[in-house]
Image (spheres, rainbow, N blue to C red):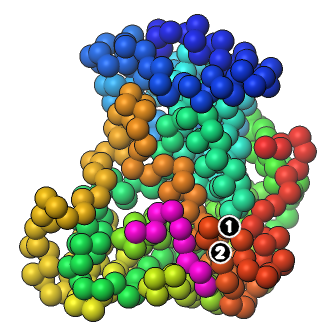
Amino acid sequence: MKNRSKKLKAVSRREFLKGSAVAAGAALAWPTIVPSSVFGANAPSNRITVGCIGVGGQGRGNMGGFKGNPGSEVVAVCDVDADHREKARQSVGLSGESSYTDFRDLLARDDIDAVSVATPDHWHVPASIAAVRAGMDVYCEKPLTLTIAEGRDLADEVKRYGRVFQTGSQQRSGREFRRGCELVVNGRIGKLHTMRVGIPGNNKKCGPTWTPEPVPEGMDYDLWLGGAPWEPYHTQRCHYQFRFILEYSGGQITNWGAHHLDIAQWGNQADNTGPVKIIGKGEFPKTGLFTTATKVDVEYTYANGVKLFLRTGGGGTRFEGSEGWVYVNRGKIDAEPKSILDSVIGPNEIHLYESRSHTQNFLDCIKSRKDPICNAEVGHRSSTICHLANIAMLLDRPLKWDPQKEQFIADPEANHMTWRPRRAPYLL
């Protein structure tokens, strides 16, 4: 697909960079203009070209998915860590000219159709918005956002520019999760009244004290920090362990909770809304570098009366109704009574969006211009559930939430925590 109508894309980007109203109009029209070459066989000229931004652990996995798909071709890689970047470049077989430190240089290319964003969480939205504005479709890892406010910004920008956006909540493409949610929404457990989500405790330990370390050679640490506050470098601040520091992530709530809470939202048919009340108790480190909760106990209440309990321990999502329960986790589905599992969803009942591969679903939607199974709005709403928990635990008092206005009711302190200032020059 890299040899498709470059002229259209290049002109649109030039107009966009000028900030003209014409560019905005062109962006809105992009979804209706799909080159015919997209619909051909998987010849090299017809493949969807992908640039990978963030090629650490999860990023390499995503890159491998696009590399191994006959309908896509990885043409560029980007990472602030030279070691990650070089390993990714070699694994794909790219030249040095297709390897970037700054994602903005990757986005300046006119031969890329889509990007995979697998940066630390605090870079998800800035990188995704920049890609959307550059005319690219986006596959972005979960949790989609660092704050509630930036999630709304992202969802609105995706809609404004008409881009295809897939949140990396791949459990929605798992057979057992769709099956479990279909049983719930079609009343096989009676009236849903309770949902229970378990998440693991922290899988990394941090000492009571820490001292700054020299920045490793080949790492652009200032760019890694981006809009987050300036802090001295330490090994545990970066790569996987960033998720246990509130400046960059939200702990296991946004790590595993983003998966299992997303399924709870799906089963409760709440993809475009959220709870109206949150009560949270959490235990937080008193010393050391890590700042996210080590123990979580949160209760949400939805407008339909359904309760959702999020607690440390176990995993998966359990739906409880007036006539039974259904439990789903990776590779597992269970129910009581067991006969629920044999139930057939009839042709006139609710059939949820079916995807058997998160990556393939994204690629298919790039061609059809339809929404993927976990679009930006869905990803934003599921991330919001995670952030509501952290805010409630940090404030340690009950909160009332308006999911339509996306604001806390009569609570300026809580509303202030739905956004964060960004360090210049890394602004949205």
Instruction: Answer yes or no: is residue 93 visible.
Output: no
Residue under the image location 84 percent in, 78 percent down: 413
Q: Which residue is mark 2?
A: 402
Instruction: Answer yes or no: is residue 345 visible.
Output: yes
Q: Is residue 358 left or right of residue 134?
A: left
**Magenta span main SS:** loop
Residue under the image location 55 percent in, 62 percent down: 381
Span highlighted in magenta in the image: 269-277
Q: Is residue 235 left or right of residue 381?
A: right
Residue 300 in picture, x, y percent from top left:
54, 84
In this rendering, the answer to whether 184 lies above or below 399 is above
In this rendering, the answer to whether 128 lies above or below 150 is above
Label 1 to label 2: alpha-carbon separation: 6 Å
**Callouts 1 and 2 close, C-beta under 8 Å:** yes
* Magenta residue check for 148: no
Q: Which residue is mark 1?
A: 405
* Magenta residue check for 271: yes
At mark 1, the secondary structure is: loop
**For residue 405, what is the image quadrant?**
bottom right
Q: Is residue 247 left or right of residue 385?
A: right
